Amino acid sequence: MRASLFPQRASRLFPWGLRRTRLVARQQSRPVHWRHLPKALTPTENSYDSFGTFTGSVLPGGEGASIIYTGVTKVSKERETIRNEGLREVQCIATSMDPDLRTWRKLDKPVIEAPPAGAKIVGFRDPFSWKDEDTWYAGVGSGFEHQGGVVLLYRSKDARNWEYLHPLAEGTWNGQLVSNPGGSGEMWECPDFFPLGDKHVLIHSTAHNVYWDVGVFDKRELRFHSEKTGLLDHGAYYAPRSMLDGKNRRILWGWVQETRPPEESKAAGWASAMSLPRVLTLGSGNELQMEVPPEFASPRHRGDARTSDPGETGQAVSQGHSSQPRGRGDLQVQANRERHVRA
């Protein structure tokens, strides 16, 4: 089996691009060995993503492969969507007919060019999507100023023209005034939303932590109602995204943020890493549970951390890691933080 992972990469703090790391597993049950491939998406000069290609996800359905991602440009303060940064975010699509996913074509213009009219938002990025029969849905991480994080829900019949509906779910700001709204619960970053068992799960990153909510998705109202919530991890884990594997397991991949001083990362020539994958399930009380796939037990005992494949080109590595990623500050674990999600 071959799969692909697209972590972000930046040779400097800006602009960011997506560096492609490709999974090469000789057996379908062993998603262990990784190999770097050339960059998949990079900023296009004088275009809607000239200042960065940010996080996105697979856009299901249609011919070939498609991804929906956030493009960033430098703008005046009046047009910014990232507070005090002079940056504007839009949602974009790129497609590939290449079975190896080496080449991608961007659409001529963004598919979602602005946040909802009249909304005072403090971020607009990291889209995820799903398809239900003949309708596509997309959620975008955002936040209402001095109110709290939110997932903005969109709908489309052709995956090109999108209609804003309403918040899929909302959170509560902790009242702290910080320059990065993602650090105070004022914005939710990298949301993910998917069915699991007979429930739905919402995962989002905010206030230097990752949280999960298990609840019910009302398909008539198109709103998520949280029934149980918790802290997903302690430590440097952040901004995860999930997928279904060939065994129909829900697999979660996360970014392990850098904890070394910047000077050490620069000297090493790389920063941060991708986490081990985690299999998600629901417990007897509908709490979210995680475990490392059993495929990793054998390589761990054998010390089989690296591999090379003479049939492939590129550098073999045990985990994908991005160079000089976006700085988010030191992790502050607050296990007793009160947090509320409202539909």
Image (cartoon, rainbow, N blue to C red):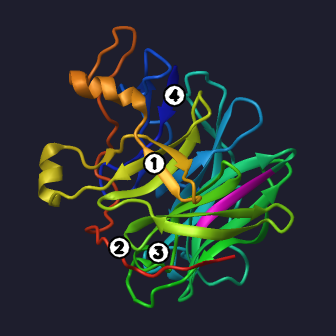
Classify 10 Å Cα crowding around label 4: few (below 14), some (14-19), many (20 and above).
Answer: some
- For residue 260, what is the image quadrant? bottom left
Asked if the residues shown at circle 3 and circle 2 are in contact, with their CB atoms under 8 angstroms apart, the answer is: no
Q: Position of residue 23 (x, y in %)?
A: 43, 27
Q: Is residue 137 magenta?
A: yes
Quarter of the figure with the C terminus: bottom right
Q: CA distance from mark 4 to mark 2?
A: 34 Å
Would residue 293 be counted in the magenta stretch?
no
Residue mark closest to the camera, 4 vs 3? 4
Earlier residue among tags 4 and 3: 4
Tell me the distance, in whole angstroms, between the alpha carbons under discs 4 and 3: 36 Å
Which residues, given as a range, are shown in magenta? 136-141
| Residue of label 3 | 86
In the image, which is nearer the foreground, mark 3 or mark 2?
2
Q: How many marks?
A: 4
Q: Identify the secondary structure beneath mark 1.
A: strand
Q: Amino acid at mark 4?
A: Ala
> Which mark is first along the chain, 2 or 4?
4
What residue is at 61 percent from the left and 21 percent from the top?
99
